[in-house]
């Protein structure tokens, strides 16, 4: 993999690398990155991988290559809201009217006081001021000590600009050869055109199977009546005319329009909703125009202007009626208001037009080949299958220096983004280490959640495994129902359910006692790493297709059908294949691990799309015989 990454840098070709768990893929791209003469950006999807790179892999690698490569450096760069803001901490938080106020005592107040003390200590000790290093806190507490990019006064106007954690991080990144960041910041920098990252020559996207989703999230906007009302109150103190009152009136009109809108995807905007959005848009623009042009060091004014500008931008996008966007109304829950949401129908075009031409891009993950090839993932990130370079001919460095042309893609002439795709394999012998069990005798899953047959099957499997089970469920309700049933039926085992405590606490308890089961939903499918005999059975209750009423997924499937493709296969089945591969990947984490992945959905074996889904999974030994599986689990626990 290291050689392939180095060749991609030399050829200036894009590269997709499927690298299974345990291959050491981070070292395989970090070594060529350190040897590359120009700046390299590494973008991850999760904080866990970012920490692994910065706290473990890079320090060890730097020690290993000491004296063998030119002096190099690395830095971490995140969005501004990930750093504590000294201006907000020292001068106070604007209230609804833009007046700077102190935080009242209470749970949140005590939390904020701890965060303030920590931030001041970070300043004295030269710390990073990053949220990840802060004392335990809630989202609400962190908002009291941080600002968004729009709320920031700017280093030149802020009294604390010289000490600013975010500015220091930018300065370190500008001086560094290697910049570690996240998918969202990469998307803002490359796609939205907002300069967030110093100029770079190469981008390495780790956890690349999540890139499309993360870019979509970064490009998704929301609007609530509460946010409009809050912006109107903040504007009140800073405008002399009636502009803030007009925005408050527009919020009332928006409330009525939202109340009359059916939750879900909005294909045709009603006249009432369209008029309300226009009212809010124009009123927000009027407020922005009425504000003083330069906020100076007035944090209340900066906060008000940021809120109004955000509302104007979102309303302008929603009223534009672009076919490239999907609009929907999401129902609120406890203490959560209803939200109007707008997201891009697809992001491949933005990636193709704005990221791929800018730099050589290397994308890697353990799950890039869905259905047995790279086409689904490549298409989602803007690469055309016809552009793939099939011949892996080596390109000597001397050829690059002589200016010899790089390889040309297979396909139509004039294609501009040649790319290669390689699968570097796995150190694991899946056929000997793992069993893929599809419970073909069970009925297909229904809408009412787990039935008696599924619960009986779970009981038999968990009992045979003696605990040691990670249950991956399609809904929180199913996970809780399974946990409740297993506690009643198998009282000698400990059964944990996601949501009963923080995930790190649950994971620690799961690892600490082998006679334990952990049942949960999406975050467990992708984010849990538990090697060893802690986890010898992974149960998947059903194929994880997106919900039929998911507004964005259903819109994408419909668009694919209109374009002549198969919307179900290109959207729903691809989504399911990715999650299945990630879920099954929780089982085998080292060369010593053994166990069973049990899928309780017979459609994996019987449906026409089943072969596509199975081709996305590790090549474990397959069976549909429950007796064979229970015996295998019993041998492992014996």
Image (spheres, grey):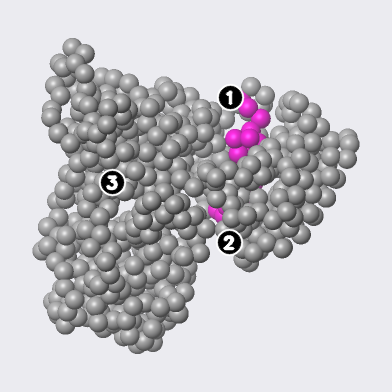
Whether 426 is among the magenta residues is no
Residue name at image x 75 percent, y 36 percent? 285
Residue 110: quarter of image: bottom right
Q: Secondary structure at mark 2?
A: strand
Q: Using a 10 Å C-alpha cutoff, classify the residue at mark 2 as few (fewer than 14 neighbours), some (14 to 19) or many (20 or more).
A: some
Between 201 and 369, the residue placed more toward the observer is: 369
Mark 1 → mark 2, Cα distance in angstroms: 47 Å
Q: Which residues are magenta?
A: 137-155
Instruction: Check disc 3 and report the residue beneath it.
Output: 375
Q: Is residue 260 left or right of residue 185?
A: right
Residue name at image x 21 percent, y 72 percent? 437
Q: Residue furthest right?
A: 241
- Residue 123 lies, with reference to residue 258, above or below; the image says above
Q: Is residue 25 left or right of residue 90?
A: left
Whether 152 is among the magenta residues is yes
Q: Upstream in the sequence, badge 2 or badge 3?
A: 2
Instruction: Check disc 1 and report the residue beneath it.
Output: 162
Between 107 and 611, the residue placed more toward the observer is: 611
Residue name at image x 28 percent, y 46 percent? 375
Query: Mark 1 or mark 2, which is nearer to you?
Result: 2
Query: Mark 3 or mark 1, which is nearer to you?
Result: 3
Q: Are marks 3 and 1 in contact (CB under 8 Å)?
A: no
């Amino acid at each position: 993999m290291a050689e392939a990454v180095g060749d991609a840098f030399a050829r200036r070709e894009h590269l997709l690398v499927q690298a299974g768990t345990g291959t050491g893929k981070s070292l395989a791209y970090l070594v060529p990155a350190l040897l590359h003469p120009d700046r390299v950006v590494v973008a991850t999807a999760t904080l866990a991988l970012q920490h692994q790179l910065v706290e473990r892999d890079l320090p060890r690698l730097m020690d290993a290559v000491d004296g063998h490569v030119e002096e190099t450096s690395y830095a971490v760069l995140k969005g501004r809201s990930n750093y504590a803001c000294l201006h907000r901490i020292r001068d106070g938080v604007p209230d609804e009217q833009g007046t700077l106020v102190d935080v009242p005592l209470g749970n949140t107040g005590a939390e904020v006081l701890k965060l303030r003390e920590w931030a001041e200590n970070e300043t004295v000790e030269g710390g990073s001021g990053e949220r990840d290093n802060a004392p335990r806190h809630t989202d609400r507490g962190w908002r009291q000590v941080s600002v968004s990019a729009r709320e920031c006064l700017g280093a030149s106007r802020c009294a604390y600009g010289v000490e600013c954690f975010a500015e220091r991080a930018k300065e370190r990144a500008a001086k560094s050869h290697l910049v570690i960041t996240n998918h969202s910041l990469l998307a803002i920098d490359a796609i939205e055109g907002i300069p967030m990252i110093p100029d770079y020559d190469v981008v390495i996207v780790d956890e690349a199977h999540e890139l499309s989703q993360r870019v979509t999230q970064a490009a998704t906007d929301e609007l609530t009546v509460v946010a409009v009302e809050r912006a109107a109150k903040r504007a009140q103190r800073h405008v002399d005319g009636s502009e803030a009152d007009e925005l408050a009136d527009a919020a009332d009109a928006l409330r009525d329009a939202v109340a009359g809108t059916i939750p879900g995807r909005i294909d045709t905007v009603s006249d009432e909703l369209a008029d309300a959005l226009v009212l809010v848009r124009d009123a927000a623009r009027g407020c922005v125009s009425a504000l003083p042009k330069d906020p100076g060091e007035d944090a209340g004014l900066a906060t008000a202007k940021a809120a109004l500008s955000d509302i104007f931008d979102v309303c302008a996008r929603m009223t534009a009626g672009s076919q490239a966007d999907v609009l929907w109304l999401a129902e609120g829950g406890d203490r959560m208001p209803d939200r109007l949401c707008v997201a891009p129908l697809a992001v491949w075009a933005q990636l193709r037009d704005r990221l791929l031409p800018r730099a050589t891009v290397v994308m890697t993950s353990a799950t890039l080949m869905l259905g047995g090839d790279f086409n689904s993932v490549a298409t989602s990130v803007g690469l055309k299958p016809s552009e793939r370079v099939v011949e892996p001919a080596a390109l000597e460095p001397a050829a690059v220096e002589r200016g010899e042309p790089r390889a040309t893609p297979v396909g139509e002439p004039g294609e501009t983004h040649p790319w290669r795709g390689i699968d570097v394999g796995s150190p694991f012998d899946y056929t000997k280490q793992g069993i893929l069990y599809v419970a073909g005798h069970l009925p297909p899953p229904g809408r009412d959640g787990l039935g008696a047959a599924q619960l009986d099957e779970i009981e038999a499997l968990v009992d045979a495994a003696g605990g040691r089970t990670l249950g991956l469920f399609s809904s929180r309700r199913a996970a809780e129902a399974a946990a409740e049933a297993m506690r009643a039926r198998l009282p000698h085992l400990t059964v944990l359910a996601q949501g009963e405590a923080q995930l790190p606490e649950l994971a620690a308890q799961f690892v600490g006692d082998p006679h334990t089961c952990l049942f949960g939903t999406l975050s467990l499918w992708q984010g849990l790493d538990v090697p060893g005999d802690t986890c010898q059975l992974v149960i998947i209750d059903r194929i994880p297709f997106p919900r039929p009423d998911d507004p964005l997924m259903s819109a994408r499937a419909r668009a694919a059908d209109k374009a002549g493709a198969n919307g179900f296969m290109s959207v729903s089945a691809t989504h399911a294949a990715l999650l299945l591969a990630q879920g099954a990947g929780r089982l085998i984490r080292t060369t010593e691990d053994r166990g069973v992945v049990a899928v309780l959905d017979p459609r994996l074996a019987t449906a026409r799309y089943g072969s596509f889904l199975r081709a996305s999974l590790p090549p474990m030994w397959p069976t549909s015989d429950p007796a064979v599986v229970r015996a295998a689990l019993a041998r492992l626990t014996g």
